[in-house]
Image (spheres, grey):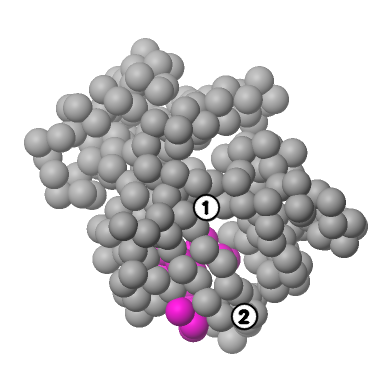
């Protein structure tokens, strides 16, 4: 079986009459992290939204060999593509347990919810300690842990992570990234990561895609991208 999970070719996307992405092409492999880097407004979040079926798009998007470019967001999610948005998307009035249960129900496999929840609590013991607490009362870092935990409850084949470090203190950022590394090491999950902090992305990613003004201007290994001064300037916002 091929390690290639996601194939994106000539992807264009936008909102209403405004085009944001133009002719984007890249791949995501199993057990590997692909990072999208670029300055604010480069179109990174729109790439994730296009893959998830959350905006207008054209071009080819294939997941495990199947075209998903015409599918609605709910059907794409059922293929076990878990999207963790920048705003985390947790249900703030629900408890930690209920948020996790909802993630588990998305797969339609109720029998595995307890086992999957135990796995989430192994990665995120803070959530186990706060399992009955309302999500809206969690700290920002704990809410991010809950968002990732809920995604794991889907037994994802691929995760789309949008700015997991956003708004968090440095120590919490390091904690979350340490856990993300463990998750990718322990599983066959492919990860497409959007991260404004380039140093975090380059430490974790196996492959880097650099975006500028809605276009993909280069890609390669972290070392290859760092050695290219034009790409380096682009993702630093220069």
Instruction: Please state the horizontal and vertical placement of residue 201, each as a whole percent of the image.
Output: 66, 42
Stretch in magenta: 46-60
Q: How many marks?
A: 2
On the image, which quarter does residue 217 sit in? Answer: bottom right
Q: Residue furthest top?
A: 129
Mark closest to the chain's N terminus, 2 or 1? 2
Label 2: state its secondary structure. strand
Circle 2 residue: 23
The quadrant in which the N terminus is found is bottom left
- State if disc 1 and disc 2 touch (CB < 8 Å): no
Give above or below for 51 relative to 229.
Answer: below
Q: CA distance from mark 2 to mark 1?
A: 18 Å
- 190 or 48, which is in the foreground? 190
Q: Residue furthest front?
A: 1
Circle 1 residue: 192
Whether residue 98 appears in this view of the structure is: no
In the image, taking residue 116 as reference, residue 123 lies left or right, namely right
In the image, taking residue 125 as reference, residue 219 lies left or right, namely right
- Residue at 60 percent across and 74 percent down: it is 24
In reply to whether residue 41 is colored magenta, the answer given is no
The quadrant in which the C terminus is found is bottom right
Whether residue 102 appears in this view of the structure is: yes
- Residue at 35 percent across and 19 percent down: it is 122
- Label 2 packing within 10 angstroms: few (<14), some (14-19), many (20+): some
Q: Residue furthest bottom?
A: 17
Label 1: state its secondary structure. strand
Instruction: Please state the horizontal and vertical placement of residue 105, each as a whole percent of the image.
Output: 19, 45
């Amino acid at each position: 079986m091929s390690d290639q999970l996601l194939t994106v070719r000539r992807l264009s996307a936008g909102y209403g009459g405004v085009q944001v992405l133009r002719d984007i092409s890249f791949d995501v492999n199993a057990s590997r992290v692909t990072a999208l880097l670029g300055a604010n407004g480069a179109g990174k979040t729109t790439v994730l939204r296009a893959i998830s079926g959350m905006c207008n798009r054209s071009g080819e998007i294939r997941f495990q060999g199947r075209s998903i470019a015409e599918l609605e967001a709910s059907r794409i999610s059922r293929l076990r593509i878990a999207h963790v948005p920048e705003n985390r998307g947790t249900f703030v009035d629900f408890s930690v347990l209920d948020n996790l249960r909802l993630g588990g129900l998305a797969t339609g496999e109720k029998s595995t919810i307890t086992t999957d929840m135990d796995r989430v609590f192994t990665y995120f013991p803070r959530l186990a300690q706060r399992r009955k607490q309302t999500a809206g009362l969690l700290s920002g870092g704990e809410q991010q842990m809950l968002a990732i935990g809920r995604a794991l409850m889907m037994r994802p084949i691929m995760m789309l992570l949008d700015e997991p470090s956003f708004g968090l203190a440095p120590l919490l950022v390091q904690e979350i990234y340490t856990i993300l590394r463990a998750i990718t090491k322990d599983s066959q999950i492919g990860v497409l990561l959007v991260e404004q902090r380039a140093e975090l992305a380059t430490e974790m990613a196996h492959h880097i895609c650099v975006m500028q003004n809605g276009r993909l201007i280069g890609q390669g290994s972290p070392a290859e991208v760092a050695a290219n001064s034009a790409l380096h300037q682009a993702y630093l916002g220069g």
